[in-house]
Image: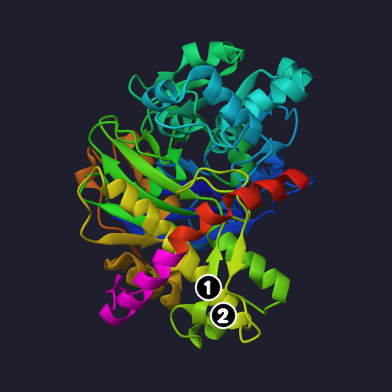
Amino acid sequence: MSYLLGIDLGTSSVKVVVTHISGTITAVASTSYAIDTPRPGYAEQNPESWWAAAVDAVRQALAKAHVSSVSAVGLAGQMHGTVLVSPQGQIICPAIIWADQRSSAETTAITDRIGAHRLQHTTGTLPAAGFMGPTLVWLSRHHPHLLEQTHQFLLPKDYVRWKLTGVFSTDASDASATGLFNIRTRGWATDIIGMLGLPVDRFPQVLGSMQVAGHLSSAAAQALGLQAGTPVVAGCADQVAQAVAGGLTEPDSASVTIGTGAQYFQPLLTPQVFQNLHTFCHALPDRWYVLGAMLSGGLSLRWLRDVVQAADYAQLEQRAASVPPGAEGLIFLPYLVGERAPIHDAQASGAFVGLTLRHHTGHLARAIMEGIAFSLRQIVEIVEEQVTPAATLTAAGNGLASDLWRQITADVLGRPLRFRPAYEQTAQGAALIAGLGVGVYRHTRDIPTSHSAHDMGDDLRTAPQPAQQERYQRQYEIYRDLYPAMRSAMHRLASQG
C-alpha cells in the first residue's frame, strides 16, 4: 500500500488528506460542524458530530483519490478540550472545548492551590480556561455526578481514535496541553492531579505520537470504506502536526498561524518557562515547543462577517484593502472570548478604540487584521527575550491565506513570511507522522517535501515593507498601552455579565 491517511479534527471542521508516500497530496476533503454556546462563556460540541464528520470527509477523500486501502491512519486535533466517556465509550455530556471560559475562576484556584512556580516548571504552563485541568475542577465543583459516571477523560482527537480502534489512549503532545502533565517525564502529573482531588485512574494511557495506538475495527472500517486491521498511529496536537509537515523541528524555525485562533510556535531543545505562554511536548521525543495561543484570530473576522452580514471573507478583505494601514486611527483589541497569550486574562473583552463617524466596515475589518498581528508581535517579543529569533517564519492557517492579512502580519512583525497556498498542513502532518509510526519513513529527515497532485502553486514569500513598518510601529506602541489602561473596566463589565 502506497498511501497514508491524515485526519485533522479542527474546531469548526474535520479535514482529511490522502497522501502518497512520495509526498504527493492525492486528495483533500472536509466536513464542518458547529460550536454550541448554550450560555455566555460556554463553548461545547457533540463528539458524535466529530465522528460523523470524520466518516463523511474520509469517504470523500478516498473517493477523490480512488483509494480503498492505506498503510496507516494518523490523527491530529484541536487541543485542550474535555470529553467524558463511559466504559463503552458513551458520551456523558457535551465536550467542553478550548474556547470555553466557564472555568476562569478555577484557574485562579488551581494556581493558588499548587503555586505558579510548581505548575510552570512541572506542566510548562499556568492553567487557562478551556484546558482540561480547570474544566475537570469546574465539573467536580458543579457537576460531580458527571465525573462519577466517567470511565476516561479524553481529548477531542482521542475520542475519534477510540471510534477507530476501540482503544482509550492519548499522546504526550496533546496530554501536555491539559495543564495536568509533567512535560519533563512525559507522564501524567499525578501529584498535581491528586492535590486537585481528581481521580488519577481516569486519565488514559500515554503513547508516543509515532506509536501505533491500535488497529481499525471492523465497524470503523466499514463506516470509512477502509480495510479492517489498518494501523492507527497515536498522532498529536494540531499545532505539532502542522509543525512536522512544515519541517519545524529545530529551534531556528518558527511559525505563525491564523485559523479560528492564532498561534506562534517555536521548537525547543529543552523545556523553558515563558511569561503567559505555554511550553508543551513536541511529537519528537527529544523536542518541546513554546506556544503563544490567542483565542480569537480568524474568529474575530468571522464575528464581524456575521454582524455586518458580509457575503464572504473576500468581500471583507476587499473593503479592508481600501483602507490605509493603521485603519485611520482605529485599533481593535481581539479579546472576544477572553485571552490567553499575551495577557492571560479570561475576563478581558474585545474593543474598538478610536472609533469615529468616518470609519466603516472596511476600517473595522482592517483594524481586526492589524489587532491580531499586534498581539502576535507581543507574543514574539516575549519569546525572543529568551531564545534566538527565527529568521523566517512559516505562515499557516486560512487567515494568512489572505494576501492582505499576510502582508499586514509581515509588516507588523518585521519578518518575511513563507506560506504554502491551498495546503492542509495539519492533516498532512498527521499522515506523515503515521508514516513514521509504521516505518514508511525511518526518520523525520526521510519525510519527502510535500506537494499536491493538483496545481496548488509554489510557496509564497511575503516580505515586510519598510514604509509600513514605521507606521505600524507607532500604532503598535499605542496598542500595547490599551489593555493595561482598560483592564479594570473590562473586569468590572465581566462581573456584570
Q: Which residue is mark 1?
A: 367
Question: Measured along the vertical axis of the image, is residue 81 above or below residue 120?
Answer: below
Q: Residue at x 36, y 68 (%)?
A: 412
Neighbourhood count class around disc 1 (C-alpha, 10 Å): few under 14, some 14–19, many 20 upward? many
Distance between the alpha carbons at the discs numbered 1 and 2: 6 Å
Q: Is residue 471 magenta?
A: yes
Q: Is residue 307 magenta?
A: no
* Percent position of residue 486, x then y: 58, 55
* Percent position of residue 154, x then y: 59, 28
Question: Measured along the vertical axis of the image, is residue 183 above or below residue 443?
Answer: above
Q: Nearer the viewer, residue 1 or 259?
A: 259
Q: Residue at x 59, y 60 (%)?
A: 299
Question: Measured along the vertical axis of the image, is residue 384 above or below residue 481?
Answer: above
Looking at the rendered structure, the kind of residue marked 1 is Ala
Q: Residue at x 20, y 45 (%)?
A: 445
Q: Nearer the viewer, residue 48 or 339?
A: 339
Q: Secondary structure at mark 1?
A: helix
* Percent position of residue 240, x then y: 38, 43
Q: Nearer the viewer, residue 59 or 300?
A: 300
Looking at the rendered structure, the kind of residue marked 2 is His
Labels 1 & 2 near each other (Cβ < 8 A): yes
Q: Which residue is mark 2?
A: 363
Q: Nearer the viewer, residue 317 or 205?
A: 317
Point out the stretch of residues depicted in magenta: 457-478
Image quarter in which the N terminus is found? top left
